[in-house]
Amino acid sequence: MKKIVVAYSGGLDTSIIIHWLKKKYNAEIIAYTADLGQGEYLEPLKKKAIKTGASKIYIEDLREEFVKEYVFPSLKACALYENKYPLATALGRPLIAKRLLEIAKKEKADAVAHGCTGKGNDQVRFEATFAALNPDIEVIAPLREWELKSREEEIDYAIKHKIPVDITKKSPYSIDRNLWGISIECGALENPWKEPPEDAYQITQSPLKASNKPAYIEIYFEAGIPRKLNGKSIKSVNLIENLNQLGAQNGVGRIDMVENRLIGIKSREIYEAPAAVILHNAHNALEALVLDRETMHFKQIISQKYAEIIYYGLWHSSLKEALDEFVDKTQENVTGTIKIKLYKGNSTIVGRKSKFSLYSENLATYTSKDTFDHKSAKGFIDIWSLPLKIRALLEKNR
């Protein structure tokens, strides 16, 4: 093997991987880093990767593609894994894997490598994408192969080989961050009974310390896509950045959950996703206003499956392609404005309006403006409950 392209974040695992692969395979190592909005200056990774043993590193800004082609489709689908996790990490993996393969082709590499653990979800997401887009590429997963059995041993390895890593045994959190959210695990978080320490959170203000004055914002959607913030058109990346900042200041976006990983293990994770929480909340409220009951209820079933598809790494599956068609059809009238109050960890819908609104005040009101024919309710109830009545009569006469 002559050349390997590595998905490189500069964290503990991938920093060690470059050194380990070069030593094991005696191959040229090329690092690849995608900027998905990690919130950090990535240029220092060039020096770090070369110092660790890479011959070259690619760093690409994929934020706009990430938002438009991955985040917004999941938002339109209302995709929240197990009704909570907005899938930030899961959405980033198929994009990174796609570009990793394209770099490998450009460099005529023999293999690609990733830094995912043998009991995590990301290994599946990377390798399922590899299989879908280039089934012939060789894949190396060092964390499934090497002799290092814990993060403590990895830290010792880094120290021994003078590999620079920003992690200590006193702060052993594993953190993955992009524009759509932050995933945090390991350390004290592995005890599901223990409240997450404040130092685990990376961007959000504690709701206890957030401002006593609520912040009000308005988000305008067009066909399910957020286009304006407080009445002004805004680019997609900037919109999410602004909502992350506003939400974080008000303690919005903290998620603490025990989730079912793909391979069957239950895992305690915490997430910070201010923009995702705000936008999902707003989008759901707008759908409630403009979608008819049957479409909305059926879409909730689709949303769960769509979230599972993303979580399970099946972004390039034929099922997802089919569901995209359904989702896009449901979004044709999801246009309107949602008003939200951000206050001490809560994102509360306080107003909604749309030219496609199915809400009728004259039908809903209990004032003199009421136009609903109350007398028609009896006939409706008689027909609706007829199967129940027939069954009850049958059982009575047995």
Image (spheres, rainbow, N blue to C red):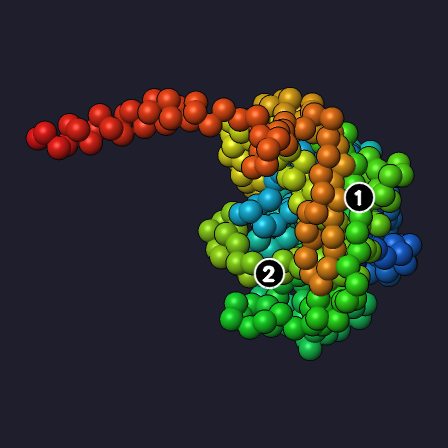
The residue that appears at 43% across and 25% down in the rendered structure is 375
Left or right placement of residue 91 versus residue 59 in this view: left
Residue identifier under label 1: 218
Q: Nearer the viewer, residue 229 or 383?
A: 383
Which circle marks residue 256 in the picture?
2
Near mark 1 (Cα within 10 A), the count class, few <14, some 14-19 or many ≥20, is many
Q: Position of residue 300 (x, y in %)?
A: 54, 35
Hey, which quadrant is residue 286 in on the image? top right
Hey, which quadrant is residue 269 in on the image? bottom right
Q: Nearer the viewer, residue 254 or 258?
A: 254
The residue that appears at 73% across and 59% down in the rendered structure is 343
Q: Which quadrant holds the N terminus?
A: top right
Q: Position of residue 288 (x, y in %)?
A: 61, 35
Instruction: State whether residue 17 is above or below residue 326.
Output: below
Q: Residue furthest bottom?
A: 170
Near mark 2 (Cα within 10 A), the count class, few <14, some 14-19 or many ≥20, is some
Q: Nearer the viewer, residue 338 or 226?
A: 338
Q: Nearer the viewer, residue 209 or 16?
A: 209
Using the rendered image of the protein, determine whether residue 236 is visible from the camera's viewpoint. yes
The residue that appears at 53% across and 47% down in the rendered structure is 82
